[in-house]
Amino acid sequence: MLGYPAAMASRTATELVHPARDHLRFTTVLAALGDPVRLAIVARLADAGPDGELACTTFALPVSKSTQSGHFKALREAGVIRQRDEGTRRLNRLRRDDLDARFPGLLDLAVPQGREIIAGW
Amino acid sequence: MLGYPAAMASRTATELVHPARDHLRFTTVLAALGDPVRLAIVARLADAGPDGELACTTFALPVSKSTQSGHFKALREAGVIRQRDEGTRRLNRLRRDDLDARFPGLLDLAVPQGREIIAGW
DNA sequence: AAGCATGTTCGGGGTTCTCGAACATCTGCT
DNA sequence: AGCAGATGTTCGAGAACCCCGAACATGCTT
């Protein structure tokens, strides 16, 4: 693949993977939420309001940049968050509508727990 | 987590590890439930009634014996199930009271999803 | 004592996490 | 134009977990 940007990730060019609402799997979502860092991310997004969008940097997470990147990717591929690129920032938004439709009550249960994790930092 | 005092696994002699209700961690429980095999186990135990106890063999899971053993251990160490030995059998019971007390609504949400997994087998 | 039933542990292969370091992309400033 | 800074992603290596079959341990039954 030498002709093309071998490193991939042309940011604006590549379309990000987002599973459709009907393809969300409960165990995958639970596994995604079953990590303190990711649950904290979800709680922050939930507190940002229905249409709140936050860049990755604004979370001040106690893990390295590359680890953050992996966590955001995990949440996106599980269908918990939606990401879109704007300039150099990758904006994150909670897929509350889809999650509430498929697993009603889950976020209401998880978000307070995520807030407690943040409070403990 | 980490192994216990050399374990030894004398079955009736060694006491099995069971985290107290106050020590249950939400993310740990979620991670435990975030696996199809383990979620199916939980659903079966829930359908066995409040005091239902089932031996590991009775689940007919589509994984090997050693893998089953690991899953039951994961559920126990996460505080989702309680295990006790009776003769050569290891009986499993869902810790519904503890889970309902700490994370109300979680099991009501997870159990139906576990039933669907079983139905798909 | 021998045999069987029930689980656990062990070693190896595959996938996932973690980090620092290097790379890629976009914005802004000179 | 050109270069520096901000923002994320990818890479390589080490640790941890999931999967399996094989071997082991324990208890019940004959």
Image (cartoon, coloured by chain):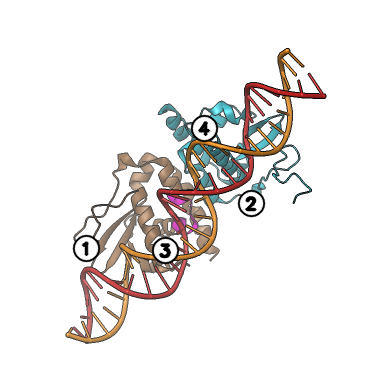
Chain colours: A cyan, B brown, C orange, D red
Tag 4, which chain?
Answer: A
Mark pair 4, 2: CA separation: 23 Å
Give a yes or no on whether discs 3 and 1 share a subunit: yes
**Label 2 with label 3: CB-CB less than 8 Å:** no
**Which residue does the numbered mark 4 point to in the structure image?**
A43
Mark pair 3, 1: CA separation: 20 Å
Q: Which mark is residue A23?
A: 2
Lower position in the chain sequence, tag 4 or tag 2: 2
**Which residue does the numbered mark 1 point to in the structure image?**
B10
Callout 2 amino acid: His
> Tag 2's secondary structure?
helix
Q: How crowded is the residue under tag 2: few (<14 C-alpha within 10 Å), some, or many (20+)? A: few
Callout 3 amino acid: Thr
**Which residue does the numbered mark 3 point to in the structure image?**
B67
Q: Position of residue B81 (x, y in %)?
A: 35, 53
- Identify the residue shown where x is 54% and y is 28%: A59
Relative to residue B22, is residue A22 drawn left or right?
right
| In front of the other: A96 or B108 | A96
